Image: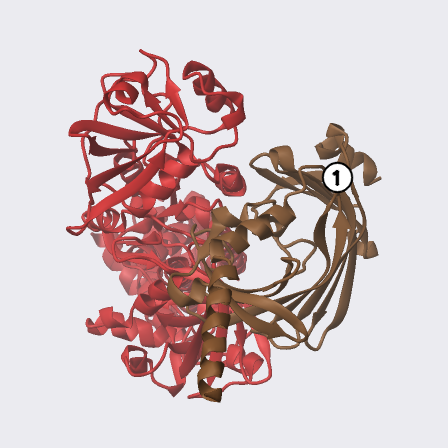
Amino acid sequence: MLLARLAFRNIGRHLRRSLFLGSAIALGTAVLVAANGFAHGISVVLFDKVMVFVAGHAGVFASESGSQQTQIFRDGTWLRQKLAALPEVRRVDEAVGVFARALGNGKSDNTILVGIDTRQLADSKDRAEFEETFRIVQGSWQAMNDSTIPLPTLLGVDKAKALNVKLGDQVRLRFSNVNGQNQAGKATVVGIFETDNMFMQAPMYVGLARLRDLMGYRPDESSGFNLVLHNPKEDARRVADTIQSFMVPQVASIPSRLGGAPVRLFGLKSDSATRAQWMKGLSVPDSLLREKNLVVIPTALSVSQKLGVGDTFSLAWPLRYGTDSGRTTLIVSSIAPAGKLPDSVIAMRSEGFFRTYNSQIPKRQNLSPAFDTSWAVREWNLLPRAATTDEYRKQMAELSFARGLGPVVSVRTMYEAASDILKLENVLNVVTLWAVLVLFFIILIGVLNTLRMTIRERTREIGTLRAIGFQARQVLGLFLFETLYLAVFSGLVGVVLGFGLMELLSSFTIHASGNPMGVLLVNSHLYFSPTVTGTLGGVVLIAILSLLTAWLPARAAAKLSPADALRHHE
Amino acid sequence: MKRQILSLIAVFAAAAFAQTAPTGQAVLEMLEKQNKLGNDLRARVNLTQTKAGQGAKQMAMQYFRRDKDDAFAMLIDAPEADRGNGYLRQGEHFWMYRRNTRTFQHVNRDESIGGTNAHGQDFENRKLTTLYAPAKGELGTPAPEMLGKKAVWKFEVRAKLPDVDYPRKIYWVSRDEWFLLKEQAYSASGTLMQSSYYTKYIPVDGRTIPSQMLFVDEFEKGNRTVVELSEVKTGKIPDETFTKAWIESKSK
């Protein structure tokens, strides 16, 4: 206790020196706190603004065409409900987007049409975030909800310039819908915005519902989904694993009746290896190898329904959504020998089967057939979870192989889908850390030198203390206490200075349009997000480093013999 | 009396027309028959694409088609930057070969050929009657019309399958020879997107196929593509032509 009081008194007695040393420590702390705020700010911007915009923290990708660009999941209502029920999920965004050719006033440009749902912005926080993201300089985003305007659109200043359009002008658009058909639309510019986020400069934003209509999605169908999580870093992988587990597909089939008897239509896998097997097993003639609407019925059904090759028959079934019935008319291509196909099973090649199944999904059923279904297609093909970005890219590159073999579903997190952005964050964090360490090293050399000078100047004082009975370890403790007080007080001052520095730096307006680093700005300002642990950690780190720095000169002082110390003259 | 005679003539003419006017389905089947050669086919294809404000880009390629299994191969000869590149369709798979990297990449049928407006699926031999059916009612019934000096049947078709480029088309088919002379293609929302003109036909194996086609982009005015077929030959093409190894060997 005495040591603590003496140390506190000594700081006051050597006020100028303490102020000098304290200032150096405060400066170091301020830089550390500000650097921490900047690094975490980058993380927040990347995760909550860029990542969410590009791919979500996690998500479900679904394609039928073998193309990465066009996503469709037929049972969209079910999937949305399942995703929204996950406790880790803050928001479920439907990712509707398409590459398009845009024609303005005498100028044209490529763009991406992105659907946004401005009707969801009832919450003031969401609205503030939206307005921060889209800094409208002309018009208003509220006009996106005006049903009297044909296809309202928001576009960036650069895109408006590239298309030579202004507020109220029309932009003609050409793109492909979910089926790959050419589609055209005429959008009206209702808002022009500025943005520092390069990912937002290329697209044109239109109402989600209207884009869905133009793209040809039906009410219960959806595109893929991007998920915004409460704690993306902690939960992304776990959420993806959970989704992967409930997305395991069942065998796809259509239950119906034929002549009063229950029948079930299954899809035959048509990849070359499986196809060769079932063609042989079901005795399908080679001449039907390329018949995509191939329909095989069992002998028993052929006999009971008096159906031969070339005959037609119709099936009807209750649809999963709505009250209508699904219907199809099929032509018998081949009759399977007795015993090769269960009596109530009708098999159709996957291309033809999915054309019917996907456009008229039957009611969800818990089906566990009592026969081998290795030849039958599932509702969709669930890709295994990619462990790395390279694996994910490879899966996406091979999507085109899956065309005609049924829908493909992939569950991914930001760690696979947008790893480049995460790498950017890591690089910025490392650069910031190194810059701080170099700066701090310089400051510590100053602290070390000042402490050595202090102890040298106070050698006779040390001698006096030792002469009146102070032990060596008490002298050591005295200097360490002084340093600790100084470090803690200066550290706290440094925290205040750090916050002031962040306030100052974030007050500067930076115009970074066109610069990729602009993605790190919020409203053209640097964004700092200091954390409690980061800030307190900074103070503790400074205190520990200061104590370590003070250790050597303090130990040297403690080792002085009282006689030598008292004889010491400057 | 004169008016009565004229009315009678009109009734007879209408009756005669009613007897001779084909159904839309019959015209589609005729067009499909014209296109089906039943033989392998090879040709040189010259493609001139003009883009508004960008001038013309010319492309020349060798084209090989085998209908029995829907295979085709293409080797690009010009421009120099694309020379040696190629495309190969084997069964369900469509490959793009890049000479520079000596690699085959599996691509989608929607892939652009050499950066032009032509796509992989444009070169596929898909059955017209599988893809389209005459529109219901009057629109789908061939109506007599003059296209320039040519007497044609004009009628509308609608897609039967969703995965076609255009869900709605209007055809002008010559009445005497059953040649498709003009085609207008509409987007899903009903906007006219492309007009195609089949300006020259050549006899091949007892059938007649278009040898010069003009595709006019109606959406982005000023864009047009002329496709010309020459050195058209039929007859068995060696199976090895439709292999990766052959494309690679020809690209050296």
Q: Quick check: A59 left or right of B80?
A: left
Quick one: A470 or A337, which is closer to the camera? A337
Q: Residue A115 in the image: x percent, y percent? A: 37, 66
Does any portion of residue A32 appear in the rendered image? no
Q: Quadrant of residue B58?
A: bottom right
Q: Residue A6 in the image: x percent, y percent? A: 27, 58
What amino acid type is highlighted by mark number 1?
Arg
Q: Which residue sits at x=53%, y=22%?
A: A286
Quick one: B127 or B7, which is closer to the camera? B7
The number of discs equals 1
Quick one: A162 or B7, which is closer to the camera? B7
Query: What's the colour of chain A in the image?
Result: red
Q: Quadrant of residue B218?
A: bottom right
Chain that is coloured brown in the picture: B
Looking at the image, which residue sits at the far top?
A: A339
Q: Chain ID for label 1?
A: B
Identify the secondary structure beneath mark 1.
loop
Quick one: A303 or A58, which is closer to the camera? A303
Quadrant in which the C terminus of chain B appears? top right
Q: Which residue sits at x=53%, y=67%?
A: B154
Q: Quick check: A53 left or right of A3?
A: right
Q: Which residue sits at x=28%, y=62%?
A: A8
How packed is label 1: few (under 14 Cα within 10 Å), some, or many (20 or more)?
Answer: few
Q: Residue B78 in the image: x percent, y percent? A: 82, 55
Q: Which residue sits at x=27%, y=19%?
A: A303
Q: Quick check: A134 left or right of B231?
A: left
Q: Residue A166 in the image: x percent, y percent? A: 48, 88
Residue carrying label 1: B102
Colour setup of the view: by chain
